[in-house]
Image (tube, rainbow, N blue to C red):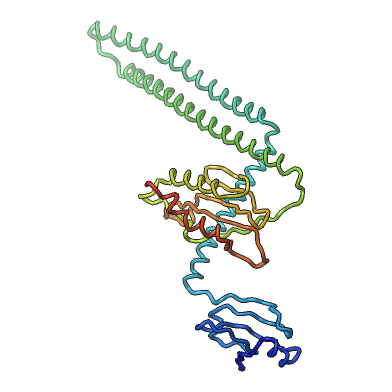
Amino acid sequence: MRTLFFPLLFLALAQPASARLYKWVDEQGNIHYSDKLPPTAVKNPYSKLDERGLVIEKKERAKTPEELAREKALKKLREQQKRQLEEQKARDKVLLNTFRSEDDIILARDGKLATYDAQIRIAYTNIERLKAWLETQKKKAAALERKGQRVPQKLLSEIENTRKQIKANYESILRQEKDKELIRKKYAADLARFRELKALKSANRGNRKEEKRSSYNVIVETVVACDQTVDCGKVWEKAKAYARRYATTPIYVDTHRMFMTQPPRNKNDLSITVSRLHPEENQPEIIFLDVACKKQVANETWCKTEKAQEIRANFRKAVLADR
């Protein structure tokens, strides 16, 4: 192996036309040019040069076991986040295919509520009937007692059974009232999401060019575990507020499990996603922030802008403040 310290131009002219050169940096920071790459050089970044001395390929330094383990863990987070987004898209598609307008959603909601109201009215009618019957049974038992006669066990059983039926009808009313509240919340969420989707469709109507979504770019500092010391609900709201504050693209998804802004359109844009995930069984829920920016080169994995790094570095401090 020949390791030279002469100017690159001289070295390039001295090599055959088909020769390939390497530019690498040693542990002391000295730059080397050679026709073969020493094994120790792969620990640091190096470049391949063509016969004209132009860079044709850049290689990053070899990753440490800790970095590889971190990337593996973060890959699982990205995959779960991607699945969550796909599920949200599927729900959005069903929503848009099911309803044509806000009035359709309201009518569907009111129709279901009316069904429950009818069942509740029936339950109240049954209660009134059962109460009247219970009163008759109790009077009959009281009359027997006044005569000094023993109240038959059958009558006592009927009285107890009537009371149980009244109780069961009341429990049914409470369950259906609870179901009505769940329906109201579900359709309120559907209505809000429907409006968001229609607004996005309107905003993007002039831009028919399909854009590919940037890959997620995440680091460990943006994960908060909801253990006994963390109120997940409060941290979730803070995380969404943090994303709204620093994202430069419009909101794309805002649900109880995911908050996402639209993909970056130019080199200065920052897209932020916050998700509530369960990456591991029997482990606490986590809140996970992801920052994405416009790719500058095809093989770029991480968003390395100064602003993105600042957002990541300050995330946990911001959402865990005043606990």
Residue 294 image offset from top left, x and y in percent: 65, 58
Residue 18 image offset from top left, x and y in percent: 75, 88
**Frontmost residue, 8 versus 120:** 8
Residue 18 drawn above or below residue 67: below
Residue 92 drawn above or below residue 297: above
Can you say which quadrant of the picture contains the N terminus?
A: bottom right
Q: Quadrant of residue 102?
A: top right
What residue appears at the point 49 percent right and 27 percent down from the top-left corner? 176
153 vs 24, left or right, is left
Residue 187 drawn above or below residue 252: above
**Frontmost residue, 97 versus 210:** 210
Residue 66 image offset from top left, x and y in percent: 47, 71
- The number of numbered badges drawn on the structure is 0
What residue appears at the point 37 percent right and 14 percent down from the top-left corner? 134
Give the residue at the far left of this rendering. 148
Q: Quadrant of residue 112?
A: top right
96 vs 222, left or right, is right
